[in-house]
């Protein structure tokens, strides 16, 4: 490692150091959500889960008969 120039090491370490500084700054600015904000986020997440589940159910519901027509009942 003695043959590696120092500026190469600095160039390799600098992005990681900047990332650590930026991450620390972000964590310091983050706040815990209050009850109202938490309920709003939980509701939006629940609606998203429900919609994705319903969409998957509809796709599966449509796919089964089409698959039976194409492949046949065997």
Image (tube, rainbow, N blue to C red):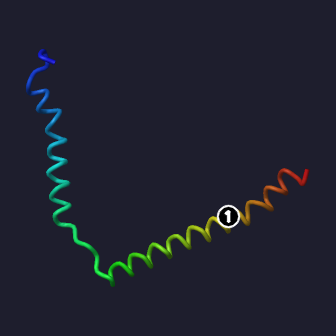
Residue 20 location in percent, x, y? 18, 48
Q: In which quarter of the image is residue 60?
A: bottom right
Q: How many labels does the image show?
A: 1
In the image, farthest residue toward the left? 6
In-image side of 35 versus 67 (left or right)? left
Q: Which residue is drawn at 77% across and 60% down?
A: 64
Q: Residue furthest top?
A: 3
Residue 45 drawn above or below residue 40: above
Rendering coords of residue 51 (x, y %): 56, 72
Q: Residue 27: where, in percent of width, then height?
A: 20, 61
Secondary structure beneath dot 1 equals helix
Categorize mark 1 by other alpha carbons within 10 Å: few (<14), some (14-19), many (20+): few
Please tell me which residue is depicted at 18% across the width and 41% down the height of the picture: 15
Quarter of the image where the N terminus is located: top left
In this rendering, is residue 13 above or below 31? above
**Can you tell which quarter of the image residue 39 is in?**
bottom left
Which sits in the foreground, 2 or 74? 2
Image check: 5 left or right of 46? Answer: left
Residue located beneath label 1 in the image: 59
Which quarter of the figure has residue 54? bottom right
- The image shows residue 51, relative to residue 71, as above or below, that is below
- Residue at 14%, 33% in the rendered image: 11
Q: Furthest residue to the bottom?
A: 36
x, y percent for residue 3: 13, 15
- Seen in the image, is 67 located left or right of residue 26? right
């Amino acid at each position: 490692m003695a043959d590696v120039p120092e500026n190469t090491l600095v160039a390799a370490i600098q992005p990681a150091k900047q990332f650590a500084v930026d991450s620390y700054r972000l964590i310091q600015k983050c706040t815990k959500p209050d009850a109202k904000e938490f309920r709003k986020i939980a509701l939006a997440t629940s609606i998203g889960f429900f919609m994705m589940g319903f969409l998957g159910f509809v796709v599966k519901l449509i796919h089964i008969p089409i698959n039976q027509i194409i492949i046949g009942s065997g």
